[in-house]
Every structure is written in structure tokens, then in C-alpha cells.
Image (cartoon, rainbow, N blue to C red):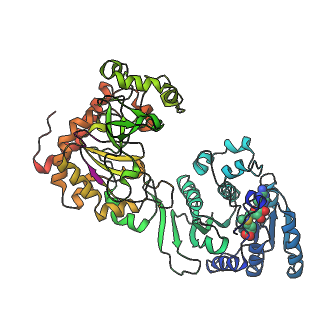
């Protein structure tokens, strides 16, 4: 569909061509799905319904529902021609207000819920000022809603599919829907995590460009509930006609896996590394003021103003775009780092760097406007995600914005530690040798394969701290025959790490104050025990 009308957009209207519905339904036949009833909740012109009617002689009833009266009138004409046994019923209705329980109660099991829900997001509907949305009131209180739909923007199909899953909570049946692959995966993850029994789950990738002129990752998603068996795996087929699955996604060891086969090979690398903790860069939410570009002898800010300030609080910085593509681009920008740890009193800047203070005061309006609640009731010009680790001389860095597993080493620049912005993740290192070792093992094939078994590349930001922290560097170093080197550095960094304040957890809220003595001791003892165990074969002494 190249030129969509406003109405087609609002109703996520992409009618499925019958060659695709025929192929999809024949997949269900091959899977031996034999429904006694078929329901297509947003049937449009009804090509799924008609293909199902042709393929499933076992079905006593087939019901199609849509909000578009014109489509249904056309469909009725076609149905009248072929429905000799009077099995097909067409209902004009709104998905969001229809009494589905009444319809479902009349359907014999197993039920097949099939079709292609609207392709539109809540944000698009907001732009169109459309009311084609679930009612907000009962929407927010739904259990699992947040887990499924995330925050403010979500796919309408996701919400509808969640409903389909609810309908089959206590009924035997199969859901078979065309949808975004990410939506299918989210629903599976939700069901697996909540122990909703799934006996069969298959994803067949489809070419959305070819069939709908849409450049999205889409699939035919087939899932059978209450079928007896309970599996946490889903086979992924590259096309609707592939006889063999290409890989399996699944849920094991508390992780949603993008490739179960790869994970099985490297799952021994999963674990907590107590010596190395991933950090994200500094968060300031005001790039125009806090990030400066060098401009002959001065700097220039995001408003285009030329600035002269002291060097004391200025640090060379890297953003995702400086490290995500090929070589690292050094010296492009500098950041004003107003604190050494979260919550530090910033008044000292007045005395130690008066020009910097004046510059910040002059831009107080922009800084005070920062929307996030984390800046409220904090010292003036506060930043987050800052701690001793921010100033480590060496770092192993990776971009959180780019879809590339490439770990880079960065050292000092102009004699100063390089700081990262909050789109970059890094491991602080205290020597070049340490950083080179860590980058070397992280860029190794076992590490890449391990990460690739848990990364979903189709996600907007596939690389996250949650993903990175799943890999135990100690286990990885052992796998690569570098455990002795690893332990040497792990041991040296131990005291540095235990003194550090917490990272940018929970958007910096965790960084309110440095660890109290009790907390500090607990971490120290735990790390010490881990190190004691690790150092034993090497005859290291852990001094208490
Ligand atoms: C992606 S099209 C798919 C149509 C059909 N299932 C097919 O596969 O060809 C989505 C359909 O959802 C219908 N629709 C959109 N919002 C709806 C609502 N609130 N209630 C019922 N149907 C709706 C549209 O009219 C459209 O026919």
C-alpha cells in the first residue's frame, strides 16, 4: 500500500492478499491444527476467513468481525456464493467495545483465532486525534499491560493480541496472526514469564514489503494454548514454506533468548562478575549547555555562543556517534562535569572556577528546565551517572545506540580521562594492559556468540546494560585461557571498585549518597570471598 488515506492509517488497514492467507492457512493445516470454530476479530475483506473456510471442513462455525461496514458488505456477497452449509457469520462491531465473552462462549473448542490486526501505534492515533483505541480507564489497570505494551507508545495489534491470549486462558485453541515480529516476541516473553502454558509456538517471517509495501519486520505468529505440553521455546522459520526452522527463541535461566542453540553452547559464560561492573556515561539532559566544541582558542556551545571557561571542569567526551561506527573519533566535544559523585555540593565551583560558574549561572534557565524528576532538590547544575569510575584513565566502551558488538579501548586525551555521555556503556579500567585484555576477551567469538544468543537485533536499542552484565568475564577469560591475566587485574581493581558509589541505576536515584559503612562492608566481603576463591589456584593472598 503506497498511498494510505487518513482512514486507512487510522484503522491500521492493510488488507491481506489471498495468496498470503492461503499460504498461511496451509501452514496451520501442516501443523495439524483442526479447529471446531474460527474467529477473525478484525476481518476486513475477509481473505483469512475465506481461506480458513476452504481449508477447515472440521469447523462448525466461522465468525468475522470488523468496524468497516463497506468491507463487510462486500464480504457478505462473497460468503453468500460459497457458504452452502451456512457456517460463516459476519458481525459489524468495534473491537474495543464488543462483548467478546458472549461471542466466545458460543464457540466450540478448539478455537482458531486468526487474522491480521491493525498496523498502527497509539502515538500515530494520537497524532490523528483518533478514538480507535482501547478505553484508557480499563486499559491502565490491566495486569500485564505495562509488561506488554511498555510505556506511552504501543502497537494496537499488541494490545489486541494480548486480548486474544486472555480469551484463550481457559479455552483450548490457537492464535495465528500476522504481526510485527517484535510484538510476537513480547507476547511470548510475557506468557513465558507468567507461566501461561504454551504447547506450540512458531514464527514464520514474512516479506512485509512484498505483501503490504511496509518496511517492518513482520511474521505469521502461531501459538497454541492449553494444548497439554508446556514449552518455553518458539521455532523461527525464514519463510512460510520452509520445512525446517532456522533457529529457536526461548526463555531459560530467567532470560529471553534470541537463539537457544547458541545459548546452549555458551550458557556456562552467564553469571555475575563481581569485579567488573558495566556503567553508563554521564547524564546531564542539557547538551546545549554542558557539551562544548573546540573553536580555535575557545569553545562553542549548542546555542552557537563562543565561550571561555577554565579547564578544571572540562573533560574530553565521547558520544555513541563517536564510537559506534568504525574508528573512535576523539576531541570532537568536551563536557562540563560539575560533580565527582552524585549529590556533591557544586558551590565549590564558584571559588575554584569562577568563569565556569558564571557560564552555568547564565544558562540557569535552560538547566533548571530539565524535566526529569532526578534533578529536583539537588545541588545546582547537578549531573547523574557520575562516580570514580567516570574518571578512570582507561575504559572499554560500546555504543548503546548502534547495532554493533564492537568493544573499543579508550585512554587519556590531552592528559585527561575521557568521559562518556549516557548513550555509551563502559567498563572502567586502571591501566592500558587491563583495558586491552578486557576488550580482547569481549571481542572474542565466544563472547560475541553469547551476546548474540540474548540480543534481539530488531529492537530499537538492542545493546543494554542488562544484556552486557549477563556475561561473567571471569568465566570468559577461563574459556579463552586468560584466567591468570584476568585475576591479576580483578585483584588489583578490587579496592577501587568497593569504594565506588553506585552507578546510574534507576536513573541515578540509587546514587543519592555514597554507600554506608555496612553496605560497603557487605560488598567488600562478598567480593573478597569471590576473589579468595578465584585466587586460590594461583596462591594469591587476599588481605582482610
Ligand atoms: C490490517 S487490516 C487486516 C484486515 C484483515 N484481517 C486481513 O487480513 O485482510 C486491519 C483491519 O482492522 C479493522 N479495524 C481497525 N480498527 C478496528 C476496530 N476498532 N474494531 C474492529 N475492526 C477494526 C480495519 O477495518 C481493517 O480491516
Q: Residue furthest left?
A: 539
Point out residue 468 in the picture as x, y percentages from the top left corner: 37, 52
Q: Residue furthest front?
A: 296
- The one nearer the camera, 313 or 194, is 313
Q: Relative to 357, does residue 424 appear above or below in the rendering?
A: below
Q: Relative to 253, does residue 544 appear above or below in the rendering?
A: above
Q: Is residue 65 magenta?
A: no
User: Is 535 left or right of 442, judged from the image as shown?
Assistant: left
Point out residue 517 in the picture as x, y percentages from the top left corner: 29, 25
Residue 502 found in image quarter: top left
User: Is 455 left or right of 518, judged from the image as shown?
Assistant: right
Q: Relative to 226, does residue 391 appear above or below in the rendering?
A: above
| Magenta extent | 408-418
- The one nearer the camera, 38 or 432, is 432
Viewer can see residue 330: yes
What is the number of callouts on the image?
Answer: 0
Q: Relative to 167, does residue 63 appear above or below in the rendering?
A: below
Q: Quadrant of the N terminus?
A: bottom right
Point out residue 36 in the picture as x, y percentages from the top left corner: 75, 72
Point out residue 366 in the picture as x, y percentages from the top left corner: 51, 30
Residue 45 found in image quarter: bottom right
Q: Quadrant of the C terminus?
A: top left
Q: Is residue 413 magenta?
A: yes
User: Is 423 left or right of 485, judged from the image as shown?
Assistant: right
Viewer can see residue 104: no
Residue 443 found in image quarter: bottom left
The kind of secondary structure the magenta stretch mainly shows is loop
- Residue at position x 15%, y 39% from top? 542
Amino acid at each position: 500500500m503506497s498511498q494510505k488515506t487518513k482512514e486507512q492509517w487510522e484503522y491500521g488497514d492493510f488488507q491481506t492478499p489471498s495468496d498470503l492467507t492461503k499460504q498461511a492457512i496451509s501452514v496451520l493445516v501442516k501443523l495439524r491444527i483442526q479447529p471446531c470454530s474460527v474467529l477473525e476479530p478484525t476481518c476486513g475483506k475477509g481473505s483469512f476467513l475465506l481461506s480458513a473456510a476452504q481449508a477447515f471442513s472440521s469447523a462448525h462455525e466461522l465468525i468475522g468481525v470488523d468496524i468497516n461496514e463497506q468491507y463487510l458488505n462486500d464480504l457478505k456477497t462473497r460468503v453468500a456464493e460459497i457458504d452452502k452449509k451456512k457456517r460463516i457469520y459476519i458481525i459489524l462491531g468495534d473491537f474495543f467495545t464488543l462483548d467478546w465473552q458472549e461471542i466466545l462462549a458460543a464457540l466450540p473448542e478448539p478455537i482458531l483465532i486468526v487474522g491480521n490486526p491493525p498496523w498502527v501505534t497509539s502515538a500515530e492515533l494520537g497524532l490523528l486525534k483518533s478514538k480507535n483505541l482501547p478505553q484508557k480507564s480499563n486499559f491502565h489497570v490491566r495486569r500485564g499491560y505495562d509488561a506488554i505494551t511498555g510505556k506511552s507508545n504501543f502497537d494496537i495489534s499488541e494490545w489486541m493480541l494480548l486480548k486474544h491470549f486472555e480469551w484463550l486462558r481457559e479455552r483450548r485453541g490457537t492464535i495465528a496472526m500476522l504481526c510485527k515480529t517484535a510484538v510476537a516476541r513480547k507476547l511470548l516473553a510475557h506468557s513465558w514469564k507468567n507461566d501461561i502454558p504454551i504447547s506450540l509456538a512458531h514464527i514464520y517471517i514474512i516479506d512485509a514489503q512484498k505483501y503490504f509495501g511496509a518496511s517492518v519486520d513482520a511474521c505469521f505468529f502461531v501459538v497454541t494454548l492449553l494444548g497439554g505440553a508446556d514449552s518455553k521455546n518458539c521455532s523461527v522459520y525464514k519463510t512460510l514454506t520452509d520445512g525446517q526452522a532456522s533457529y529457536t527463541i526461548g526463555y531459560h535461566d530467567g532470560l529471553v533468548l534470541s537463539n537457544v542453540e547458541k545459548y546452549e553452547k555458551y550458557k556456562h559464560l552467564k553469571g555475575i562478575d563481581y569485579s567488573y561492573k558495566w556503567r553508563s556515561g554521564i547524564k546531564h539532559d542539557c547538551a546545549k549547555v554542558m557539551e562544548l566544541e573546540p573553536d580555535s582558542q575557545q569553545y562553542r556551545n549548542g546555542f552557537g555562543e563562543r565561550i571561555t571557561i577554565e579547564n578544571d571542569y572540562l573533560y574530553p567526551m565521547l558520544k555513541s556517534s563517536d564510537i559506534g561506527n568504525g574508528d573512535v573519533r576523539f576531541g570532537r566535544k568536551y563536557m562540563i562535569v560539575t560533580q565527582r559523585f552524585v549529590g556533591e555540593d557544586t558551590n565549590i565551583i564558584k571559588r575554584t572556577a569562577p568563569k565556569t560558574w558564571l557560564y552555568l549561572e547564565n544558562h540557569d534557565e535552560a538547566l533548571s528546565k530539565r524535566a526529569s524528576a532526578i534533578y529536583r532538590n539537588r545541588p545546582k547544575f547537578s549531573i547523574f551517572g557520575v562516580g570514580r569510575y567516570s574518571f578512570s584513565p582507561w575504559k572499554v566502551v560500546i555504543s548503546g545506540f548502534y547495532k554493533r558488538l564492537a568493544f573499543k579501548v579508550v585512554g587519556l586525551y590531552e592528559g585527561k580521562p575521557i568521559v562518556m555521555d549516557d548513550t555509551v556503556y563502559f567498563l572502567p579500567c586502571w591501566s592500558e594492559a587491563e583495558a586491552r585484555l578486557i576488550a580482547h576477551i569481549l571481542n572474542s567469538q565466544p563472547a560475541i556468540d553469547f551476546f548474540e544468543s540474548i540480543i534481539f537485533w530488531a529492537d530499537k536499542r538492542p545493546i543494554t546494560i542488562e544484556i552486557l552484565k549477563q556475561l561473567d568475564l571471569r568465566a570468559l577469560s577461563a574459556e579463552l585461557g586468560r584466567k591468570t591475566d584476568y585475576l591479576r587485574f580483578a585483584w588489583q581493581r578490587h579496592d577501587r571498585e568497593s569504594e565506588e558509589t553506585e552507578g546510574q541505576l534507576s536513573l541515578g536515584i540509587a546514587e543519592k549518597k555514597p554507600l554506608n559503612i555496612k553496605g560497603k562492608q557487605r560488598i567488600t566481603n562478598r567480593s573478597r570471598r569471590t576473589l579468595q576463591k578465584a585466587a586460590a589456584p594461583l596462591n594469591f593472598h587476599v588481605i582482610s
